[in-house]
Amino acid sequence: MKLSTLVAAVTLAISAGCIVSPAFADGNPTTIDKVLGSAVVGSNQHYGDISLVNGSVQMASNSSANDVSVVNGSVDIRDNVSINSGSTVNGSIETGSGLQVATNLETVNGKIRLGSKAQIGGNIDTVNGDITLDSGEVEQDISTVNGDITLTGNTVVKGDVIYKPRGKKKSFFGWRNDSKPSLHIGADVVVEGRILLQQEVELKLDNPAMQDKVVYDINDGR
C-alpha cells in the first residue's frame, strides 16, 4: 500500500470515530503461535487463540482472547479480562478481579490464583498446584491432586470440590505418602455439589454445615 493511501485510510478511520485494533487483521482477531517467546496483550486489545511452548502470557486490563495455552510459562492476567479457556503445563495462572472464562482453567505444575469476582463457565483443575478463589463462581467442578484449595468470600461452586487420588511417594524404606493437602472453605462459601475426598485431606470448614457435603472415597490399596 502506498503511503498516501495508508494516510488516507487512517484519516478516514479517525473521521469515522473508529480505530481498528492492531490485534485484528482483515477484521478477524489475530492469533499468536510461538515456540520461543512471550505474548503481551495490551489494554482493550482482543486476540484469537494464543499458544506458546516456551514463554509467558501477559494480558492487560479489559482485554480478551480465545483459548490461551502455554507449555512452559505462566499466564498473568489483569482486571476485567475475558477468555474462552486458559491452561499451562509448567507454570501458574494468576489474575486480577473480574475474570470471565467461558470454559476451563487448568494447570499441571502450577497454582491457579484468581482475583475477586471471577466467573468460570467450566472446571478449575490442577495436578500439582494450589487453587485460590475469592467471591467467584464456578459452574462445574474444582479439583486437584497435590494442591491446597482455598475458597473464601461469597464463592459459589455449582459442581463438586474434588481431591483426586494421588500416587505414592517412594521413600528409602518403601512406598508412602505422609503429607496431606489442605482444603479451606470460608463461612459464606456455597458448594452445591459434593466435597469428594479420594485421599486424606486436612479440612478447615468455617461453616460446620459444610461437613454434610463431605464424601470419602479412599482406596489405599490395603
Image: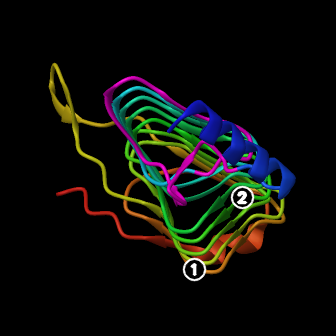
Which numbered disc, 2 or 1, marks the residue that appears first in the sequence?
Answer: 2
Amino acid type assigned to the residue bearing label 2 in the image: Ala
Magenta-drawn stretch contains 221: no
Task: Tell me the quarter of the picture where residue 100 sits.
Answer: bottom right
Give the percent coordinates (x, y) of residue 48: 48, 54
* Residue designated by label 1: 193
| Left or right of 19 on screen, residue 146 | left
Distance CA(mark 2)–CA(mark 1): 19 Å
Where 172 sits versus 202, above or below?
above
Label 1 SS: loop
Amino acid type assigned to the residue bearing label 1 in the image: Gly
Give the percent coordinates (x, y) of residue 200: 43, 52
* Residue designated by label 2: 118
**Depth check: 183 or 173 in front?**
183
Give the percent coordinates (x, y) of residue 117: 79, 58
Between label 2 and label 1, give the one nearer the viewer. Answer: 2
**Residue count near mark 1 (Cα–Cα under 10 Å), binned few <14, some 14–19, many ≥20:** some
Identify the residue shown where x is 50% and y is 56%: 26
> In the rendered structure, which segment of residues is drawn in magenta?
20-46
